[in-house]
């Protein structure tokens, strides 16, 4: 472990590189050999570090990366990543020159966008690689499925553009009810069938996110897009499990101060907790400014392998936990906010329930003022 980071602040996010590599190995063993893998590393690979996860994904055999912003793509290019990068969403005109010059793959979902990209490609004397997104029911980005064949044909015929892929995105693929996912799949297949009729062929047809990869093998097509799964986290409690996958991220801190409460003492802003009897609390130097949910008298951390419940309302930079029933707690003992200690575990889904949100938000919310410490 790199103790230099920990020494600067007694709170950190730990990234287990060995487990990340193991997860990719397991996924590649599970994945059909003819299906390519795109690794989604947007938002710093969901808080894990985009460059780190991208490089491990490529070493494992991923053929594509994906991000959500131009800045995220630039960070990867500046780190020496030369692999294809797909940029989700729509690009404003002022970003097109950089996208083309950096060799990024962008979505072109209209004739107007195709014209803009083609003009820039000609100016730079390059070929712009593009995909078309088909909106099959998510109603976000993309061209509606009934209109998609005409747009796809126009993009394919635009000089200066290379139509490499056509994709869609599930609205709900990781729950037991697959009825809408199957309807979306049917709509996407109708577009692909019409493309075939028109003699339009692309290298990558892709629709499956993690939920689709796990539960809808008929939606694998040529490539699957995985973001959360290589990190050892499942998108829901009911989707298929792959033995051996485990979380890569832990969040840890150290006890800063121990306080002995007397009956009647209150804890924290808003006085949401009042001691009815003598209690011992530990102050942890992490708060909602670091991404821990702003809970009140809810949640727990692990200290000496036992659960210590959160008391009061946590602040921007500190939270308080009850260690009365945990003997021997001392200042600077290690605290686990997310992860395992002893035989106990606090996983990302449990924290999500405390906050009333989803696991994705919990992972991406850990602030970058918490140093990332990689364990290899």
Image: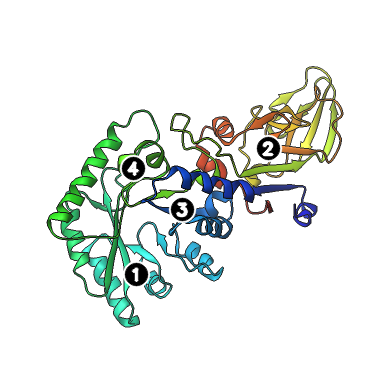
C-beta proximity under 8 Å, tags 3 and 2: no
Measure the C-alpha gap from mark 1 to mark 3: 24 Å
Q: Nearer the viewer, mark 3 or mark 2?
A: 3
Give the x, y percent position of residue 186.
22, 41
Q: Earlier in the sequence, mark 1 or mark 4?
A: 1
| Residue with the most extreme top position | 276
Tell whether 176 sits left or right of 160.
right
* Element type where label 2 sits in the image: strand
Mark nearest the camera among 1 and 3 is: 3
Left of 10 or right of it: where is 230?
Answer: left
Label 1, label 2: how far apart the Cα atoms are = 43 Å
Task: Place residue 232 in its image quadrant.
Answer: top right
10 Å crowding of disc 4: few (<14), some (14-19), many (20+): many
Circles 1 and 4: CB distance less than 8 Å?
no
Q: Is residue 365 left or right of residue 189?
A: right
Q: Which mark is residue 170?
A: 4
Q: Could you tell me which residue is drawn at 25 percent across and 68 percent down?
A: 114
User: Within 10 Å of the Cα at label 1, are there few (<14), some (14-19), or many (20+) other Cα atoms?
Assistant: few
- Residue 342, horizontal then vertical, whole percent: 73, 31
Q: Position of residue 182 (x, y in %)?
A: 27, 36
Would you name the residue on which mark 3 appears? 40
Of tags 1 and 4, which is closer to the observer?
4
Q: Residue at x 34, y 40 (%)?
A: 217
């Amino acid at each position: 472990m790199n103790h230099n980071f920990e020494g600067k602040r007694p709170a950190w996010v730990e990234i287990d590189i060995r487990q990340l590599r193991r997860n990719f190995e397991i996924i590649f063993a599970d994945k059909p050999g003819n299906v390519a893998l795109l690794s989604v590393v947007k938002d710093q690979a969901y808080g894990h570090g985009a460059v780190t996860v991208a490089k491990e994904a490529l070493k494992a055999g991923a053929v594509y990366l994906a991000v959500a912003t131009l800045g995220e793509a630039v960070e990867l290019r500046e780190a020496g990543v030369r692999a294809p990068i797909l940029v989700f969403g729509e690009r404003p005109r002022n970003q097109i020159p950089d996208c083309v010059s950096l060799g990024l793959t962008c979505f072109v979902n209209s004739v107007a966008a195709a014209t803009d990209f083609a003009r820039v490609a000609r100016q730079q004397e390059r070929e712009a690689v593009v995909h078309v997104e088909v909106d099959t029911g998510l109603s976000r980005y993309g061209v509606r499925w009934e209109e998609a064949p005409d747009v796809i044909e126009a993009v394919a015929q635009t000089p200066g553009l290379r139509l490499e892929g056509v994709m869609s995105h599930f609205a709900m693929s990781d729950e037991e009810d697959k009825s809408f996912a199957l309807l979306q799949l049917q709509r996407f297949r109708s577009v692909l069938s019409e493309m075939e009729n028109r003699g339009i062929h692309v290298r990558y047809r892709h629709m499956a996110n993690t939920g689709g990869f796990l539960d809808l093998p008929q939606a694998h097509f040529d490539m699957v897009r995985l973001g959360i799964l290589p990190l050892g986290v499942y998108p829901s409690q009911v989707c298929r499990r792959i033995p051996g996958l485990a979380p890569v991220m832990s969040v840890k801190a150290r006890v800063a101060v121990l306080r002995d409460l007397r009956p009647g003492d209150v804890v924290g802003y808003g006085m949401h907790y009042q001691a009815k009897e003598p209690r011992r609390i530990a102050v942890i130097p992490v708060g909602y400014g670091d991404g821990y949910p702003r809970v009140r008298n809810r949640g727990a951390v692990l200290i000496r392998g036992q659960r210590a419940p959160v008391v009061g309302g946590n602040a921007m930079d500190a939270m308080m936990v009850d260690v009365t029933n945990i003997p021997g707690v001392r200042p600077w003992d290690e605290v686990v906010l997310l992860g395992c200690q002893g035989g106990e575990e606090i996983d990302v889904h449990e924290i999500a329930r405390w906050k009333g949100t989803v696991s994705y938000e919990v992972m991406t919310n850990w602030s970058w003022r918490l140093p990332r410490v990689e364990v290899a």
